Image (spheres, helix red, strand yellow):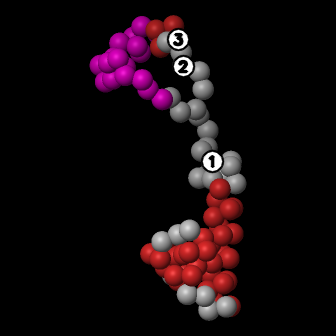
Amino acid sequence: MKYRNASEILPDELLKELQKYAPGEMLYVPSEGQRKEWGAGTGARLFYEQRNQEIRQKYSDRKMTIEALGAEYGLSNETVRKILYR
């Protein structure tokens, strides 16, 4: 994303109004339109859903302990519990 000088883009009235609220600060202006859900663009959501399903399956099928699952996936026992009980 490229930064642009607001004084080159915005009308003077709007620039003065913005300066009342955020003088000298950088602002992010979101684009119009609908936002994507978290992880939709990168595939992270799908990855974690599949991982969590695997954890639930291993816990129920093989009766792996929470400690063993935590060690296998590099998660804390508390995180494994949250995944299992959701």
Query: On the rendered structure, is 30 left or right of 59?
Result: left
Residue nearest the observer in this picture, 12 or 4? 4
First in sequence: mark 1 or mark 2?
2
> Which sits in the foreground, 49 or 73?
73
* Left or right of 78 on screen, residue 68: right
The residue carrying pointer 1 sits among few (fewer than 14), some (14 to 19) or many (20 or more) residues within 10 Å by Cα, namely few
Q: Is residue 28 above or below residue 38?
A: above
Q: Position of residue 73 (x, y in %)?
A: 60, 71
Using the image as rendered, state which of residue 58 and residue 67 is in the foreground: 67
Q: Nearer the viewer, mark 1 or mark 2?
A: 2
Q: Which amino acid does the dot numbered 2 rest on?
A: Tyr
Q: Residue 86, can we see it?
A: no
* Neighbour tally class for label 3: few under 14, some 14-19, many 20 plus, Cα within 10 Å: few
- On the image, the x and y values in percent for residue 62 come to 67, 91
Disc number for residue 75: none
Question: Quick one: quadrant of the N terminus?
Answer: top right
Q: CA distance from mark 1 to mark 3?
A: 27 Å
Residues at discs 1 and 2 in contact (Cβ within 8 Å): no
In the rendered image, which residue does mark 3 sit on?
A: 9
Disc 1 to disc 2, C-alpha distance:
23 Å
Residue tagged 2: 3
Q: Is residue 62 above or below residue 33?
A: below
Write the residue at 42% across / 23% down. 26
Residue range of the region highlighted in magenta in the rendering: 11-28
Residue at 66% from the left image edge and 84% from the top image edge: 58
Residue type marked 1: Lys
| Quadrant housing residue 14 | top left
Residue tagged 1: 36
Q: Which amino acid, by three-letter code, is at mark 3? A: Ile
In which quarter of the view is residue 69 placed?
Answer: bottom right
